[in-house]
Amino acid sequence: MQSNKIGELTVGSNFGAVPRRAGRRRFGFEKETQTAKREESTRQGLLQPTLVFVPGSAGVGVAKQLVEYYTRRGLSEQQAREKFWLVDTKGLVTRDRGDNLAEHKKYFARTDNNGHQFRTLEEVIEYVKPSALVGLTATFGVFTESTVRALKASVDSGGLGRRPILFPLSNPLTKAECTFEQAVQWTDGSVIFASGSPFSPFTMKTPDGQAITYHPNQGNNVYVFPGLGLGAILSKATHVTDEMVYTSAAALAESLNAEEIHKGLIYPNIERVRDASLVVAREVMKAARREGVSKLPESQWIEWEEWGDVALTAYIKDRMYDPMSFGTEKARF
């Protein structure tokens, strides 16, 4: 396979129920098993590489947010930063590459390349052995077949059951780094995929002739912002903290139903965005309380806490704007 020249990029490294009143229960207690599984998954994820393909300072900002995500889960900033590898049009960004690095690239510039310079994305993948490739290049087709297959080989080398993560996030579709169909075909259907623009499902036949339909994911802030704003309003937060924002993302991941999980989705179906917003709003409200920015009386929180998530969820649902109730008091809220 031939290597492709790379556009500017960044690479990251190894990456109505009946309520129960029998004793006070902290919010979310009934999800202990799910939480434990998620934390174990997160712990394993922290041990794996992440490859982030980013143009300019805005893309580096995305990578820095991921660094903060890692630090919030126990890594030092240095440990988190070392998981990320920056790549631009000249290849892997290193301190000894010999060019005048832009200021925003210096944070991720490598010093552990032992004098070697890597000029193509395939070379970087071979060297780093990442588990994920995230595209923010606004350049169609940058993720070539050889690039994606190199990522899959990197992930496969880490053991059975691992899947490559491929996020071509550039908008619109004409600027996507690769298509969903290509991602599925080049990873033999094992890809964990999300894109900035919406793709259609893709059906592919297995070697034995069985047809399998794969469903894409679209990473869109419409999944988070309504719930984040509603949670901030209903909790009477004095301001929105970083923890509230990160909590909204974690809550979104918890909002998938069994059918969506079975389909291999990592975001809820867009038709269920209101359901997801309710979950996000609830968890954001609780984060506001933990952060000390909620102005709701503590007695109100204690009352809700007695009933687990049921009472708080009902409180939020009753106050959600309903566009189908135009002219009613609920629609005017």
Image (cartoon, grey):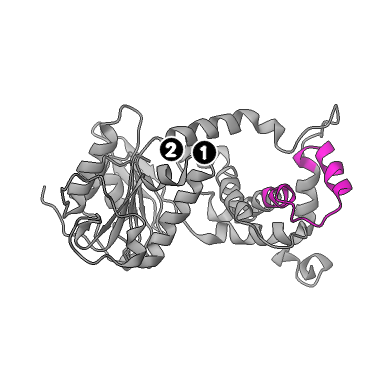
Q: Which residue is mark 1?
A: 74
Per the rendered image, the range of residues in magenta is 283-310
- Kind of residue at badge 1: Gly
Report if residue 163 is visible in the image.
yes
In the rendered structure, which disc, 1 or 2, sits on the residue that comes first in sequence?
A: 2
Residue at x 30%, y 42% (from the top left corner): 130
The outermost residue toward the bottom is: 327
211 or 65, nearer to the observer: 65
- Image position of 73 (left or right of 240): left
- Image position of 279 (left or right of 307): left
Q: Which residue is mark 2?
A: 46
Residue at x 81%, y 40% (from the top left corner): 305
> Quarter of the image holding residue 327?
bottom right
Confirm whether the magenta stretch covers residue 295.
yes
The outermost residue toward the left is: 2
74 or 289, nearer to the observer: 74
**Residue 88, labelled with which disc?**
none
Report if residue 54 is visible in the image.
no
276 or 45, nearer to the observer: 45
State the quadrant of the C terminus: bottom right
Confirm whether the magenta stretch covers residue 22.
no
116 or 259, nearer to the observer: 116
Residue at x 17%, y 51% (from the top left corner): 118
In the rendering, at what x and y percent does residue 204 appear? 30, 43
Tags 1 and 2 in contact by the CB under 8 Å rule?
yes
Whether 90 is drawn above or below 252: the answer is below
In the rendering, at what x and y percent does residue 232 appear? 71, 59
Label 2: element kind: helix
